Amino acid sequence: MKNGFLRLHAGVLFLYFTFILILCGFCYHPLVQILALVGGLAYCGLLFPAKDFCKMLGFYLIPAILVAITNPIFSNAGETVLFYLNQNPVTQEAFLYGIAMGISLMNVLCWFRIFNTVMTTDRTLHLFGGILPKMTMLLTVTLRTVPNLRRRIRETREVQQALGLYGKEQGYVARLRGELSVIQIVMASAMEDAIETGDSMRGRGFGKPGATRFRRDRFDLSQGIILAGLLLLWGWLGFLLLEGSAKIQFYPVVNATMAGWKTGCFGIGVGFLCFLPAALEVYERIRWKWYISRI
């Protein structure tokens, strides 16, 4: 079952994630960062199982906390001194800027994880295969290699341990030899698969003129209306951003635009964008349960 967000065209999804990632990475206003964080985590909670979501959240919190802690230690800019650490002033402005950078990093990691999950290999090939076929194929094969190697290493290690070739009780030297053997087997299998993939692609006519491509998405009238609406919203948000609706300054003192109708409109627009995937997912699940109840 796909929700309305996943049914969007690959080009629309790519533009959507591009705007979200740019907004999260370059706009440190607390309104933008909080809305992006809550919206991204809400969709991740619906998209991934609870166990994977907790692991992902813990993985994203570690670098965010490190950035928030280390920035006031290495940066002494700002006028409001909180305390001294080894005769170096720790300022309130540097501490708040570190928190903003940490939340921004967490947002980028979270939304890029969503992007990597939604923009699958076939969507990427469909979107860029006609423009840059070789580069697109290289990118998709590279992204596919890492999870495949991890899966093969795990499977090969389990087989080796089941055969009793090495185990934890045999010491570090035996375990090291076993790991090297696993890596050797996996690399040989990966090179063999690469040769077979190349032969298969050559046999299917990849890169030759006139070759057809699989098209998963269709850009119809509804997709055009959605894209036009998103472009208008992005233009309006860009205009409000240039007008100073989400202006924030950390040094020498913290100064942020937190009131006014422009800031309110900007927050509503950003909230709509950030909560759009989660809202469509919840709507689709409710509709699906309603259909099931009528059977």
Image (cartoon, rainbow, N blue to C red):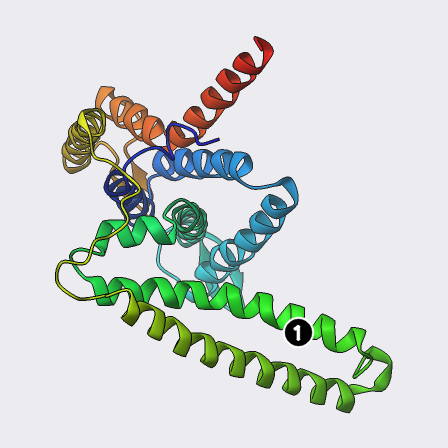
Residue 253 lies left or right of residue 148; in this view the side is left
Q: As drawn, which residue projects farthest toward the right?
A: 169
Residue 86 falls in image quadrant? bottom right
Residue 141 falls in image quadrant? bottom left
Residue ID at (51%, 39%):
44
Residue 238 lies left or right of residue 44; in this view the side is left
Residue 87, placed above or below residue 78: below
**According to the image, label 1 marks what residue?**
156
Label 1 residue SS: helix
Residue 252 visible in the picture = no
Residue 208, placed above or below residue 54: below
Q: How many numbered tags mark residues here? A: 1
Residue 165 visible in the picture = yes
Q: Circle 1: is it few (<14), some (14-19), or many (20+) Cα within 10 Å?
A: some
Q: As drawn, which residue projects farthest toward the front?
A: 203
Location of residue 43 in the rendering, given as x and y in whole percent from the top left corner = 48, 35
Camera-side residue: 79 or 195? Answer: 195
Residue ID at (40%, 63%):
143
Location of residue 114 in the rendering, given as x and y in whole percent from the top left corner = 43, 45
Location of residue 267 in the rendering, given as x and y in whole percent from the top left corner = 31, 27
Residue 101 lies left or right of residue 44; in this view the side is left
Question: Quadrant location of the C terminus?
Answer: top right
Residue 42, placed above or below residue 184: above
Residue ID at (19%, 26%):
229
Residue 100, placed above or below residue 42: below
Camera-side residue: 256 or 131? Answer: 131
Residue 38 lies left or right of residue 153; in this view the side is left
Q: As drawn, which residue projects farthest toward the top?
A: 294
Residue ID at (34%, 74%):
198
Q: Amino acid at mark 1?
A: Thr
Location of residue 258 in the rendering, given as x and y in whole percent from the top left corner = 31, 29
